[in-house]
Image (cartoon, coloured by chain):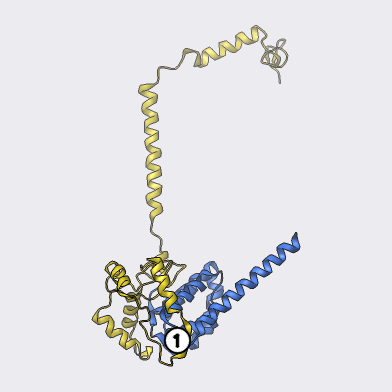
Amino acid sequence: MNRHLIRMALRATRAPQRTVSSSSVCCHNVVLDQKLRDEIHPKIGNREIVGFGINGSASYVDRCEFPCPAIRFKETTADIEKLREKEKGDWKTLSLADKKALYRASFCQTYSEMNAPTGEWKVILSCILFVLSGAGWMLIYIKKFVYPPPVSTLNREWQEQSLQRMIDQEQGHIRGVASKWDYEKLEWKK
Amino acid sequence: MFRISLKASTSLHNAARQCLKAQAGAICRPDIDHWEIRKAMNDITAEDLVPEPRIIFAAFKACRRLNDYSLAVRYLEAGQWKCGAKKSTIWPWVLQEIKPTLSELGILTPEEMGLVS
């Protein structure tokens, strides 16, 4: 579809033809041949193609960086036709409701609606916390039911007796444990 | 090396200016059509700048010629968005410059229309 609209654009930008004629600007300048019309319009319905859009395809996208999509948002109905006729006159005669209707006929969301916070962060945070708590529960289960009992050498009493044996045997008497024990005063060196 | 990079950056700057002049010139053409005004608006919004009042004037004139009110409002919204974090310092000045044209053509700002929440 891209190449079709690009070809169309090349046709539309043939400036010499346009500058020669002195007729006023026609609104429906995007002229498609029948083959393109059969290809594009079933997908977009009765909506008017108005420009290049983001990449040349005739689709509607709300993007902050591209204020003007390739097609109008709503299909052309009788009400909208009436508004367009009114639009040809002085814009001061349009009521606020008319102006809003014209905007919504061409565009889906305003910039503030596009950029409004979605609250998605709450969903993401809750999923992360849920997974972390699941991991916590698994840890408790595994510690209680899966692991064998801890080895007998891990309790405090055994460790103290171990240390006492190291001191008695003068293990590490240069730089290790025994070097930090004062054998005269029978206490740890300060 | 410093001199080379300086030259490169000034030539890039000039190229950007040329591009912008071309686009602004494109908008100012009296026989512009829907396709071209929208392409120009998209291209200018893609540049790293806030549209100057003279570009906005030209866009409004083109919208008036094409009888497309909603496009004018859309471009105002795009201009505000381009200000980014500095909207409170830049946009009031731009608005002040374009206010006469707004009242002359009867275009309401997005705030006046109630489109900004």
Please identify the quarter of the rendering in which residue A137 is found.
top left
Nearer to me, B55 or A164: B55
Task: State which chain is coloured yellow.
Answer: A
Where residue B20 sits, quadrant-wise, is bottom right
The residue nearer to you, when weighing A173 against B7, is: B7
Q: In this view, does A121 lie above or below A19?
A: above
Q: Tell me where residue A83 appears, x and y as whole percent.
A: 30, 84
Pick the quarter of the image with the C terminus of chain B.
bottom left
Residue drawn at (41%, 39%) of the image: A132
| Amino acid at dot 1 | Arg
The residue lying at 37 percent from left, 84 percent from top is: A27
What chain does mark 1 sit on?
A
Q: Is residue A69 visible?
A: no
Q: Position of residue A12 (x, y in %)?
A: 42, 79
User: Residue B92, position in %: x, y?
Assistant: 53, 78
At horizontal 60% and vertical 13% (from top left) the residue drawn is A163
What color was chain B assigned in the picture? blue
SS assignment at label 1: helix
* Residue under label 1: A18
Q: Which residue is drawn at 46% across and 14% down?
A: A151
